[in-house]
Image (cartoon, rainbow, N blue to C red):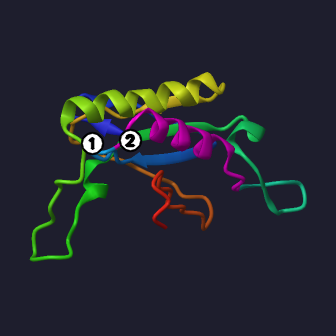
């Protein structure tokens, strides 16, 4: 991941997390997301079955704050971002999720909050998962 000043975060084996913080999110949502991200069994075991978690494989996390995940484009042609947390709250809860993941022993590389970033992802496999602490999907 790059900003105008160069590379700010990168990982080897692990997951890229585009993390959207909602205006109603709080500590319990941070804990839910960190637990789910760290424990989700999406890596292959010796039999080729998705059965291992980040914690199991010693994987890393590239966590990027992404308020645009709250873009509501159901009406009109311009998305509304009213569901996204404000900058102060968003930054605090983004950092909280990262710290919780680190407390689980995971290495976490971070993006730069509220910066334009160029994100390069080499997706090795067909796995893209949506997670929602409100469990709407």
Q: Earlier in the sequence, mark 1 or mark 2?
A: 2
- Within 10 Å of disc 1 (Cα), the crowding (few <14, some 14-19, many 20+) is some
Q: How many marks?
A: 2
Image quarter of residue 3 = top left
Report the side of 75 relative to 109 (left or right). left
Q: Nearer the viewer, residue 69 or 120?
A: 69
Image quarter of residue 68 = bottom left
Q: Is residue 31 magenta?
A: yes
User: Is 5 situated above or below 69?
Assistant: above
Residue at label 1?
Answer: 117
Q: Magenta part of the protein: which range?
A: 25-42
Image quarter of residue 26 = top left
Residue at position x 37%, y 34% from top?
A: 94
- What's the magenta bit mostly, secondary-structure-wise? helix
Residues at badges 1 and 2 in contact (C-beta under 8 Å)? Answer: yes
Counting from the top left corner in percent of width and height, residue 61 is at 54, 38
């Amino acid at each position: 991941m790059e900003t105008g000043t160069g590379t700010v975060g990168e990982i080897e084996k692990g997951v890229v997390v585009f993390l959207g913080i909602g205006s109603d999110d709080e500590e319990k949502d941070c804990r839910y997301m960190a637990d789910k991200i760290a424990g989700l069994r999406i890596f292959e075991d010796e039999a080729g079955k998705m059965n291992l978690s980040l914690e199991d494989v010693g994987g890393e996390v590239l966590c990027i704050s992404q308020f645009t995940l709250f873009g509501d484009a159901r009406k009109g042609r311009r998305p509304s971002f009213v569901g996204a947390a404000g900058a102060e709250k968003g930054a605090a809860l983004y950092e909280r999720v990262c710290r919780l993941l680190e407390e689980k022993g995971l290495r976490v590389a971070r993006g730069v909050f509220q910066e334009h970033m160029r994100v390069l992802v080499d997706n090795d496999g067909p796995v893209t998962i949506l997670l929602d602490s409100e469990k709407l999907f």
